[in-house]
Image (cartoon, grey):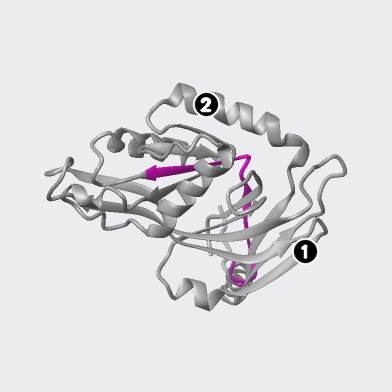
Amino acid sequence: MIRIFNNTLSGLILASVVLAIAVSPAAARPASAVIELFTSQGCSSCPPADELLAEYAQRDDVLAISMPVDYWDYLGWKDTLASAANSQRQREYASSRGDRMVYTPQVVVNGVAAAPGYDREIIDSTIAASISQLDPHNVVVDLESIDEKIIISVESANEQSNYRSGTLWLVLYKKQVEVPVARGENAGRSITYINVVREMTPVGTWNGDRAVYTLPKVDLMSRGLEGCAVLLQSGSAGPIIGAAILDNW
């Protein structure tokens, strides 16, 4: 076999390939289900739910996020990942549903229904029911990383939808955090948390028409967070009618 190798030509081809990779925008994937797990390092029932959430996080069509709460801190261990904002969000969900049930581990699916965080069968049925309920109201949300910008696009509301307004939430999270717990109900355990929300910020309002929002990427990446998602939610704790996940910045 005769092999001819041209260094100049191959170098140009390689440079072209590298350039194409460098300038290609990173696109998001849509999520048909958003699972928010309200969990605590001070809750002995939570580790099985944390492990189950990690399994849901492997699904391409699911955004599975950990929302550590702070209301068990008095039991002897201060949760190192918890925030009062997460606890408040869980309370707002309970108020919106009308059942006022706040506990750990609890998942809220698509903003409309709650389930025990360790019960796969109930969570699966809750996912299916919420997708069916919200299907007529779904809004296409897209998320792209282009050059130095994060661009969020939200399409118009469906004609048959009852939802014509909403809040656009930017969710930033650490993909994996391992925490050794020294005291409290989980003393001596090392617990791994997946997709731990560190910031959840409203970045715009949606009035039912197509809209585009642009954010500077440098401000987001400087915080050392690895995951990025966007949620379109009716009200502060209502149904989530659109979601997208950006795996790569």
Look at 39% across and 40% down and name the residue there.
Answer: 54
Q: Is residue 61 visible?
A: no
Residue at 63% across, 40% down: 32
* Snapshot quadrant of residue 216: bottom right
Q: CA distance from mark 2 to mark 1?
A: 32 Å
Relative image position of residue 6 (x, y in whole percent):
59, 71
Nearest to the observer: residue 76 or residue 215: 76
- Secondary structure state at the residue bearing disc 1: strand
- What stretch of residues is rendered in magenta? 19-38
Amino acid type shown at disc 1: Ala
Asked if the stretch drawn in magenta spans residue 97, the answer is: no
Depth order, front residue of 7/194? 194
- N-terminal of the pair, mark 2 or mark 1, is 2
> Would you say residue 26 sits in the magenta stretch?
yes
| Residue receiving disc 1 | 211
State the mark number for residue 232. Answer: none
In the rendered structure, find residue 124 and report the number of the disc placed on it: 2
* Left or right: 224 in relation to 146: left
